[in-house]
Image (tube, rainbow, N blue to C red):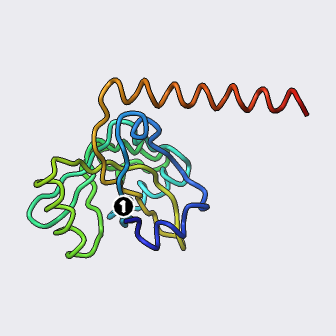
């Protein structure tokens, strides 16, 4: 189930994307979450100084946190800069967090940040409920991608 908000926001410009997540995981569902940030962190994100490559989410005491998300210090931020690797609290409805917690614990799934973007001036994080890929799944996906690229090349040559 893709939430309606996340489905409607597919065409928004992304500040950063986690392409490695699509390589390493099957994305089953996506959710939109707000992020509790400080001012200098927002400015760094607007400048594109964010890395989601090794990020993951965990749920503790009914709250969801994004870990491993690196937001570089803002250059003019001096003493107001925060630790770039600090866990960032995500803002979601309590019933969504409970549902995600149940699925993660029962089915062995994981929560991975997929992309970050701005919606009405607020930073939003697209979180995916993911299942890990095996090596043969990754090879199969690469083979499909290569075959599609060859088909597209052949179609362009005939035009």
- Side of 111 where 21 appears, left or right: right
Q: Does residue 151 appear to the left or right of 112 in the view shown?
A: right
In this view, 121 is above or below 86: below
- Name the image quarter holding residue 63: bottom left
Residue 121 at x, y = what percent? 53, 70
Identify the residue at horizontal 44%, vertical 42% (top origin): 18
Q: In this figure, which residue is indicated by the disc labeled 1? A: 38
Q: Residue furthest right?
A: 159
Mark 1: which secondary structure? loop
Label 1 packing within 10 angstroms: few (<14), some (14-19), many (20+)? few
Seen in the picture, residue 27 relative to 121 is either above or below; the reply is above
Q: Is residue 85 left or right of residue 144?
A: left
Q: Residue at x 42, y 34 (%)?
A: 23
The residue shown at (47%, 31%) is 141
Q: Position of residue 35 (x, y in %)?
A: 35, 63
Q: Nearer the viewer, residue 97 or 81?
A: 97
| Quadrant of residue 84 within the rendered picture | top left
- Residue sitting nearer the eye, 67 or 107: 107
For this orientation, the residue located farthest to the left is 61
In-front residue for pair 26/111: 26
Check the picture and name the quadrant holding the C terminus. Answer: top right
Res. 12 image quadrant:
bottom right
Residue 61 screen position, x and y as percent? 8, 64
- The image shows residue 152 at horizontal and vertical percentages of 73, 32
Number of marks drawn: 1
Report the side of 24 relative to 99 (left or right). Answer: right
State which quarter of the image contains the N terminus. Answer: bottom left
- The structure residue drawn at horizontal position 45% and vertical position 44%, both measured from the top left corner, is 50
């Amino acid at each position: 189930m893709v939430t309606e908000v996340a489905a409607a926001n597919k065409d928004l410009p992304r500040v950063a994307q986690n392409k490695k997540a699509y390589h390493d995981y099957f994305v089953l569902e996506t959710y939109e979450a707000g992020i509790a940030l400080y001012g200098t962190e927002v400015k760094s994100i607007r400048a594109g100084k964010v890395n989601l490559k090794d990020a993951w989410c965990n749920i503790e005491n009914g709250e969801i946190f994004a870990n491993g998300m690196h937001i570089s210090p803002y250059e003019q931020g001096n003493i107001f800069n925060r630790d770039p690797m600090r866990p960032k609290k995500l803002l979601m409805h309590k019933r969504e967090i409970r549902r995600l917690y149940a699925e993660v614990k029962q089915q062995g799934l994981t929560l991975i940040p997929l992309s970050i973007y701005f919606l009405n001036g607020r930073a939003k994080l697209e979180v995916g409920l993911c299942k890990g890929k095996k090596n043969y799944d990754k090879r199969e996906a690469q083979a499909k991608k290569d075959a599609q690229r060859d088909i597209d090349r052949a179609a362009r040559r005939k035009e």
